[in-house]
Amino acid sequence: MRKALVVVSALLLVAFAVQFVLAAVGGFTRPAGEDAYALHSVNGMAIIPILTLLTAVFAALAKAPGKLIGLAILPIGLVLLQPLIAMLAEASTDASGVSTPLGLTIGGLHALNGIIAVHVVVGVHRAARELADPVPADAARLVTREGEPA
Amino acid sequence: MTTGSLLVADLVIAVLATAGWLGGGAASAARRRPLALGLTAVALLATLARAITITALARAGWWFAAEKILIAGPLSLAAVGVAGPRLLRAPGDIRAVALPLLFAGYATSSALLVTILHGYPASAGAGLLAVAGVVAATAISARALGARPSRTVSRVALVVAVAALLTGTGLTVAPGAAPAVPHGHGPPAARIADEPTRRFTLTAGTATVDAGGRNVAAWAFNGQVPGPELTATVGDVLEVTLRNRDIERGVTVHWHGYDVPNDQDGVPGVTQAAVRPGQEFVYRFRADQVGTYWYHTHSASDVGVRMGLYGVLVVRPGPATGLDVTVPVHTLAGRQLPAPRVERVEPGVPVRLRLINTDSTTHRYAVAGTPFRVAAIDGVDLRGPTPLVDTAVLIPAGGRYDMVFDAPATPVALFVDGRAVYSTGPVPTATGAWPVLDPLDYGATAPVPWSRTDKTFTLVLDRGLDLRRLLPRYAHTVNGAADPDIPQQVVRLGDVVRFTIVNRSQVVHPWHLHGHHVLVLTRDGKPAAGSPLWLDSFDVRPGEVWEVAFRADNPGMWANHCHNLAHADAGMTLHLMYS
Ligand code: HEM
Ligand SMILES: [Cu+2]
């Protein structure tokens, strides 16, 4: 289970990296249009949420410390906020569909929240690796296995 | 507060409630007592506030509140019912309430997911999947927290979760009632026999055109964007030969707002096959509607129109009198078309500005320097239009307004989103703060021409997860389904048909029914109080409810879709069919 947690959280990090790439792909697609973000949308609505859920579930099943489980649950909330923020940003236009400063600010929060989510997942992944392999190899001899938390 | 902002407020409050419960649960698991109690207070307050927003939404219309009352309501009650009593018992170890608080968090978040991913109509399947998610997440959390529930409790939880999951999945995956659109199945060609009196050729091809002083890649009719302006006098028989030189995604011509016979309507896969490179198609129809219209490709319509495959169609009652100016507004590669134009006009000359919006979003038009009247909307003359001064109009995607005035001695200018597009001299006016005309109370009323309604359809516009394709997508939906899974609307020739169109989403949807003009009856329950409005394109803004009606007098299979063409591509298209 601990190995699985390491693998899933690594996959999630990859999906996040891809998501940033797809945001840029959307931004540079010509002609510009909503379908430019189709892949960003699929990755953000399907793949990332599933991997995020799996990360939280594996953290719980791996009997990780409560703090790590909490850290692994947090990205679920952050990830689900993303389409909401994107939707609210699109909603905040004036009557003729031109973005307003408020809308652009909300749009900026979408990127910011994405960055925060990545940082949290990096933390989860680090902690997961420590959990799977609690001590550096050269120090292993000094610690008894029994001392490990259950 | 408008229903649109209520929808946003409700969403934000639901997120707060969810974050409060989950955060409170996590904090109490970490034995951070004050933090846990604070976050729980936030969650309780938000849940209370949500009772208010949901009630207000229900009063605005059941469509806005259905899943919130049927699914979020019970789940929120369960959340408070489980977490509240445990909190009141004020445990010495705050960790004891971690699981109830997390349960409350899972309950509110799954309800939120139902709203975001599924929306209207509330379905038993979605509700059961939400319950399954809550039970599963709670069980996993219980394990992680080291809680040891009794055997019966865990057995019951397991049974509930599995049953809810299986039933929910079954109900959700079961194929809906939407038969696919039969291809090219219109009535036999009603091709008119009369000799054409106006002949045009439109050749679609890739081209490089000038847009605001820069050369940009475009798709163009006859090498120009917009395509050639087609003009006719009422009674003419138009023959338009469409050729495709090199547009790989195919081309058709749809006569936007022109209620042609079905086989001339230019919808690929429905009224004809798309015209592939090297092929051609001949359109022929009688110009029996006077007014301002436009034409555009309906094949790969989002990208095709955006790239430039559109043009103006004007049908006049007789020889043009005075000055007649067409202003087809478009955004090509981020540049505004048409280029600004200045011309001198003799005072006293009657002027008609034909304003057309060929983009996928609304534009704001303002005529400065003279009183004017709105003579026609979507090609149809208004009844008793009164003079307007310093008033802007919002034209929906695909819509047209005809503005008329006699040229004054001083300059006049037309501003589109603040940019002077046409003027007869320098006009310094800032138009940004002008009030906007509400066409629903402009002009003189007339009674509705029918006293009965034969068919009623409700279209609830929203977003939702569409899983019925290879790649899942966050679709733009009608009644919870996305094209091609939206059931057809079937009417009989002669029926008086009524549409109730409800926008539950956060963005405006410019609605467009092919082959018919619809008469606006009410908006948000208030009857239209001005000139009869016969529209083919109208903006249904977030939270709005429009009731429109038409007589089914043009048999065939008609597209009925959002004219934000990206939305149409992303699922917001259905079909009206005559039985
Ligand atoms: C944690 C990572 C992210 C996730 C899970 C995520 C998810 C999403 C989702 C679900 C949507 C809604 C798409 C739709 O409406 O169909 C969206 C839209 C969008 N995202 Fe992200 N996103 C992430 C990061 C970013 C970043 C870093 C950027 C840019 C710097 C970005 C830019 C955008 C833009 C511009 C849209 C609007 C696209 C449109 O016009 O439909 N996203 N995102
Ligand atoms: Cu739309």
Image (spheres, rainbow, N blue to C red):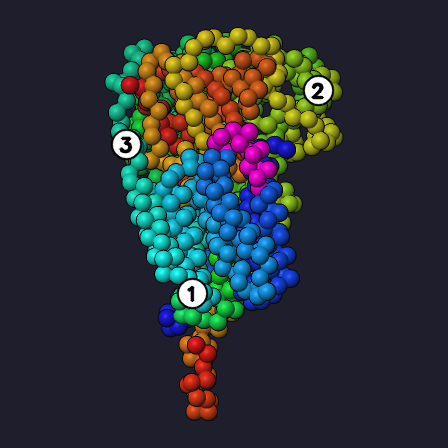
Residue B155 appearing in the image: yes
What chain does badge 3 belong to?
B
Q: Are marks 2 and 3 on the same chain?
A: yes
The stretch drawn in magenta includes residue B58: yes
Nearer-the-camera pick, B281 or B500:
B500
Quarter of the view holding residue B558: top left
Q: Is residue B67 depicted above or below B490 in this figure?
A: below
Q: Position of residue B45 (x, y in %)?
A: 62, 47
Q: Report the residue marked by disc 1.
A: B148
Amino acid on which the number 1 mark rests in the picture: Arg
Q: Position of residue B193 (x, y in %)?
A: 29, 11
- Spatial CA span between label 1 and label 2: 75 Å
Q: Report the residue marked by disc 2.
A: B389
- Spatial CA span between label 1 and label 3: 51 Å
Amino acid on which the number 3 mark rests in the picture: Pro
Residue B374 is labelled as: none
Which residue corresponds to the image point at 39% horizontal and 61% vertical from the top-left? B150
Quarter of the view holding residue B498: top left
Amino acid on which the number 2 mark rests in the picture: Val
Q: Report the residue marked by disc 3.
A: B179
